[in-house]
Amino acid sequence: MNLPLAVLWLSLLPGSPVAEECLQVELAFAANRAAELQDLQLQQPRWRALRDFRLAAIYIPADDRRRAAAVLRRGLGEVHQHLRGHPDDVEMLLLGAMMDGQYLLINRWRFAHNGWRGLRRLARAERLQQDNPRAALIRATAKIVL
């Protein structure tokens, strides 16, 4: 099983509820277990949004647009709610930008809403943290897709 380096690092922090929630999401996603992902009871908004991002990544290739749209709306709600209280959370801005981009895979006509919002979130994250490698990857992906 191939897990991102960050998740492996988090797994070395025993007892950390944040690390455990992230690890639960990534392990279920790595095994392509959508039902398990859907049923996870997560405390942190970041990991609930990540769960929905991962679920959409399972549903979109399976051409299950209805489920993908539903989990993306739920996850984007988590992002929006969190950013109201923490507008400078770079990682949540980036997750929101990625989810907005995922939504365009379901419905290209949403570019005027999700596309522009995702690009604004990405630009804000880049201003807050110029050397963030995830922001650079998202920017490069947006250039290829757009």
Image: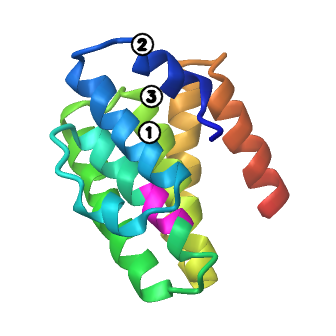
Disc 3 marks a residue whose amino acid type is Val
> Neighbour class for label 3 at 10 Å: few (<14), some, many (≥20)?
many
From this view, report whether residue 8 is shown above or below residue 25: above
Q: Is residue 136 above or below residue 145?
A: above
Check disc 1: other Cα within 10 Å, few if <14, some if 14-19, many if 20+: many
x then y, percent, for residue 139: 72, 42
Residue at disc 2, secondary structure: loop
- Is there a contact, CB below 8 Å, between mark 3 and mark 1? yes
Q: Residue at x 44, y 39 (%)?
A: 93
Range shown magenta: 53-57
What residue would you read off at disc 2?
Answer: 12
> Which numbered mark, 2 or 1, is in the foreground of this view?
2
Q: Are marks 2 and 1 in contact (CB under 8 Å)?
A: no
The three-letter code of the residue at mark 1 reads Leu
Q: Position of residue 78 (x, y in %)?
A: 25, 52
Distance CA(mark 2)–CA(mark 1): 26 Å
Q: CA distance from mark 3 to mark 1?
A: 5 Å
Is 56 magenta? The answer is yes
Could you say which is closer to the camera, residue 107 or residue 87? 107
Q: Which mark is residue 90?
A: 3
Query: In which quadrant of the rendered image does the C terminus lie?
Result: bottom right
Give how far across and how far down residue 39 sits, in percent.
Answer: 23, 62
Q: Report whether residue 115 is seen.
A: no
Secondary structure category for the residue under label 3: helix
Please state which of the two labelled residues, at mark 2 or mark 3, is closer to the viewer.
2
